[in-house]
Image (cartoon, rainbow, N blue to C red):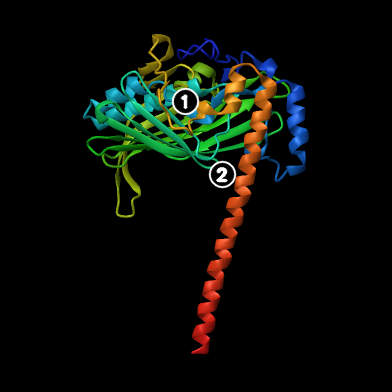
Amino acid sequence: MSADSRYDRMPQAYATYGGYEVPDADFFDKSLIYDIWNQIKSKLQEGSINLIKVSLPVRVCEPKSYLQRIVEGWCYMEEFLAKAANTTDPVERMKYVVAFAVGGLHNAVKQKKPFNPILGETFQAMLADGTQIYCEQSSHHPPVSNWLVYGPNSLWRFYGFGEWTASFRGNSIRGRQEGPHIVEFQDGTRIIYELPEIWIKGLLFGTRLIDYSGAMKFRDDKNGVGVDLVIDPPAATDSSWSSWFGYGAKLPSDFIQGELFTYKLNKEEREVNKRKVCTVEGSWLGELRFDNKPFWKWSLGLKKAEAQPVPDPLPSDCRFRADLIALEQGDMDLAQKEKERLENIQRREAKLRDSAALEREQQEEQKIENVDLSTAAE
């Protein structure tokens, strides 16, 4: 039996080693990689490079802001958070939240890069069920995006923030959106989780793949329910997996292993008395199971929620950005010029903020010094 037959996986799932096989790898060609490398090679530190501070050409971008890309990962919000809100069983609620988070990972996987949001940039949108979405870029460096989402009839709220980091690793790029994702329900239940790392592999040679890797932890401290997942698990070492792939065989990188459990918090707020409830397994490219029962399968054709921009957004909305508009209209030269213009404005404003902060710091130090001198004189 082939490695990709244990779970229901999308056609884009790379059968040999796992991951999402990029269908349009040619546009991100080697000449572009070498151009980027020449731009940043002088900044090499400890074997990695912070790509967030590197200005990339518009030809690698799609006409969207990163604020919009974040929302694309919430494509099953209508499907699963409504079910989570309408159940009183903490274990079942946790399953639906995990299905929402894991099932949406594939929808945010794209080779083209969204535009970095400008400080103060916003994005307002709605879903068909009445869900209201508010996003804002609250920091320039480090880049931090915040969001607040209200479900229909206030059945749930979803909020949090993410700081985006990315580094160049020779033949790959590693990225991460670090920060809490919090789903809150009317009874006070709060389920908190974070996203795994994302990798673009095969930039210079080999098959071009996009993949996730690492841990996803979900916690509901109010009810003592948790889930620990590992994406890209280690080699098969137990009977349930080795019978499929052979003892010690590397599992496909998009596979998921984990467990759902209950726990209590002691006085030091440490988790104790853990008890396994069920196993969690699957692939972020097709299926998620709890004790072998599917909760999400891509082939079932679940409707993906599409964020509809509100008709009268704030003037700071990303849809008003001149570079995005030009790129969407196919004017690459104008898009590049507008992108550079906006980046220069951001750099200038950042210097002004740094200068003002330094001046305030010096004034505070002077005040302290004056107080010390007056005290000594007395």
**Can you give x and y, in whole percent of width and height, for residue 346 in the image?**
61, 41
Q: How many marks?
A: 2
CA neighbours of label 1 inside 10 A, class few (<14), some (14 to 19), many (20+): many
The residue nearer to you, when weighing 255 against 107, is 107
**Can you give x and y, in whole percent of width and height, for residue 368 in the image?**
52, 74
- Residue 183 sits above or below residue 354 on the image: above
Residue 322 in sight in this render: yes
Q: Residue at x 52, y 13 (%)?
A: 4
Q: Residue at x 52, y 27 (%)?
A: 320
**Can you give x and y, in whole percent of width and height, for residue 302 in the image?**
38, 13
Quarter of the view holding residue 262: top left
Mark 2 or mark 1, which is nearer to you? 2
Q: Of the numbered discs in the image, which one, if any, rests on residue 67? A: none
The residue nearer to you, when weighing 342 against 202, is 342
The residue nearer to you, when weighing 26 against 60, is 60
CA neighbours of label 2 inside 10 A, class few (<14), some (14 to 19), many (20+): few
Residue 112 in sight in this render: no
Q: Residue at x 58, y 56 (%)?
A: 356
- Residue 327 sits above or below residue 167 on the image: above
The residue nearer to you, when weighing 181 against 282, is 181
The secondary element bearing badge 2 is classed as loop
Report whether 33 appears left or right of 290: right
| Residue holding disc 1 | 256
Residue type pointed to by label 2: Pro
Report whether 168 appears left or right of 177: right
Q: Earlier in the sequence, mark 2 or mark 1?
A: 2
Residue type pointed to by label 1: Ile
Quarter of the view holding residue 87: top left
Report whether 269 appears left or right of 137: left
Q: Of the numbered discs in the image, which one, if any, rests on residue 142? A: 2
**Can you give x and y, in whole percent of width and height, for residue 134 in the image?**
40, 32
What is the distance, in whole Å, between disc 2 and disc 1 at their CAs? 30 Å
